[in-house]
Image: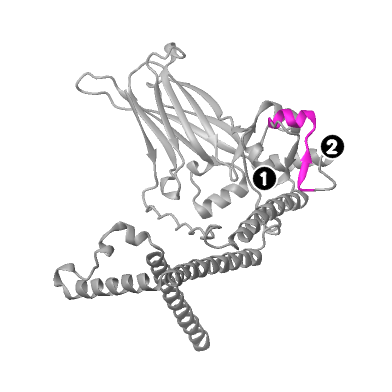
């Protein structure tokens, strides 16, 4: 009988996950409503191609400036077995198996001292299979435990502990999936043979594939957005036609990437004997000395410019939707003025009667239905209300920053 738990630090409070950025609304009306929407959709397709080209060029720049942004360090793991006290009721004595770890190089240890890096930050998944040594592989009395990295730092822990009861020798099979950002994958066998690499990130695989295309001269000279696959590449990608769009390659490659193989550790221990064993695991971490070079491919000013353009597109799309609503209103009047006026007068009379009735609670009959809040005017009202809240919040932050800056200036003048 055994149980598992995470070992957290006593003084830390769970931090809230940062708010996610809302997606930009950029969908245009359909062609039946606005003819020019076809041109907009064409621009969206051009934008997708441009994004693919920029991503490819950024990969080339990163590869030229920083061909090896990761450095290999040692993650030392301590497996500690602690014997518990005997039970007065005659039950089997208890025991505990603790797994702890730390990066051992001097630079990583200094980083850990400043940022309190925990063991789980180096892992994305931990799987433990525990069974008596004599019955390993028979699936008889196996117990399994699994930990997965959460979406935020609140789930990070300093180590892992498994407790149990009994006196017979135990064997723990530990599978460690190392955390990597960006995520590392294992290449499908034929793709690995073609590119000469076994594992790598999606960017590494795309870069290696682009090198192969350049070396073989597979890019179409007349239309650079297409490549002509040779027999080997077509077989690996599994495409029927050898002519493939260049910006569609990442999607084809993504289907050939498998989860990375975990690190396997077999550990046999005697629950009745206190002991500790050490295992060293190689892990790739970011090289702090090359962080400045990595920022070259995506400058902060460029990010701000792109965000501003996205916001402008969102605002223009909202204006198009509002203009479409007004156009429908005026078009219905132009098609049948008498029917429009009759319906409008009836609507005004109904609104007036509902406003005078105290039992309605200030809401019209239409406003009591959920479909009303999915209409374009309601969504536009929510959009404008959220914008006013953001503007007020921005102004409050600006005033607060100005007050703090003025206070610091007065303190500096006083000193």
Rendering coords of residue 389 (x, y %): 40, 72
Task: Residue 237: name its quadrant.
Answer: top right
Is residue 72 something that shows in the picture? no
Residue 280's place in the image compared with 149, above or below, is above
Task: Name the residue beneath numbered marker 1.
Answer: 70
Local secondary structure at mark 1: strand
**One can see residue 60 in this view:** yes
CB atoms of marks 1 and 2 within 8 Å: no
Q: Secondary structure at mark 2?
A: helix
Asked if residue 44 lies in the magenta stretch, the reply is no
Q: Quadrant of the N terminus?
A: top left
**Residue 84 against residue 357 in the figure, above or below:** above
Q: Which of the marked residues, 1 or 2, is nearer the chain's N terminus?
A: 1
- In reply to whether residue 231 is colored magenta, the answer given is yes
Task: Judge from the rendering whether residue 368 lies leftward or rightward of residue 101; answer left or right.
Answer: left
Separation of disc 1 and disc 2 at Cα?
28 Å
The residue lying at 59 percent from left, 68 percent from top is 308
């Amino acid at each position: 009988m055994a149980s598992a738990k995470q070992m957290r630090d006593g003084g830390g409070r769970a931090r809230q996950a940062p708010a996610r950025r809302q997606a930009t609304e950029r969908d245009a009306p359909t062609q039946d409503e606005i003819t020019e929407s076809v041109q907009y959709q064409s621009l969206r397709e051009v934008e997708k191609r441009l994004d693919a080209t920029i991503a490819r060029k950024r990969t080339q720049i990163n590869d030229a400036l920083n061909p090896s942004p990761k450095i290999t360090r040692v993650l030392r793991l301590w497996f500690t077995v602690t014997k518990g006290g005997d039970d007065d009721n005659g039950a089997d004595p208890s025991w505990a198996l603790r797994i702890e770890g730390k990066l051992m190089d001097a630079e990583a240890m200094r980083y850990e001292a400043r940022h309190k890096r925990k063991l789980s930050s180096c892992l994305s998944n931990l799987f433990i299979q525990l069974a008596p040594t004599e019955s390993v592989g028979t699936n008889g009395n196996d117990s399994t435990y699994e930990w997965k990295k959460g979406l935020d730092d609140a789930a990070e822990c300093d180590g892992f502990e498994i407790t149990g009861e009994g006196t017979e020798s135990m064997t723990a099979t530990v599978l460690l999936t190392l955390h990597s950002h960006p995520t590392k994958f294992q290449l499908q066998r034929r793709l690995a043979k073609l590119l000469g690499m076994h594992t790598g990130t999606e960017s590494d695989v795309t870069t290696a594939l682009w090198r192969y295309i350049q070396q073989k001269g597979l890019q179409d000279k007349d239309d650079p957005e297409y490549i002509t696959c040779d027999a080997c590449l077509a077989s690996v990608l599994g495409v029927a036609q050898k002519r493939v769009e260049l910006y569609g390659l990442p999607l084809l490659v993504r289907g050939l990437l498998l989860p990375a193989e975990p690190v396997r550790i077999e550990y046999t221990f005697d629950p009745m004997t206190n002991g500790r064993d050490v295992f060293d695991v190689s892990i790739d971490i970011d090289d702090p000395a090359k962080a400045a070079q990595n920022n070259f491919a995506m400058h902060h000013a460029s990010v701000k410019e792109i965000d501003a353009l996205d916001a402008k597109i969102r605002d223009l799309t909202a204006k198009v939707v509002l203009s479409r609503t007004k156009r429908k209103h005026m078009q219905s009047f132009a098609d049948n003025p008498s029917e429009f006026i009759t319906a409008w007068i009836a609507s005004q009379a109904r609104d007036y009667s509902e406003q005078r009735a105290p039992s309605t609670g200030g809401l019209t009959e239409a406003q009591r239905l959920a479909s009303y809040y999915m209409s374009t005017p309601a969504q536009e009202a929510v959009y404008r209300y959220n914008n006013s809240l953001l503007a007020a919040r921005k102004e409050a932050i600006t005033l607060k920053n100005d007050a703090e800056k003025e206070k610091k200036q007065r303190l500096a003048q006083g000193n």
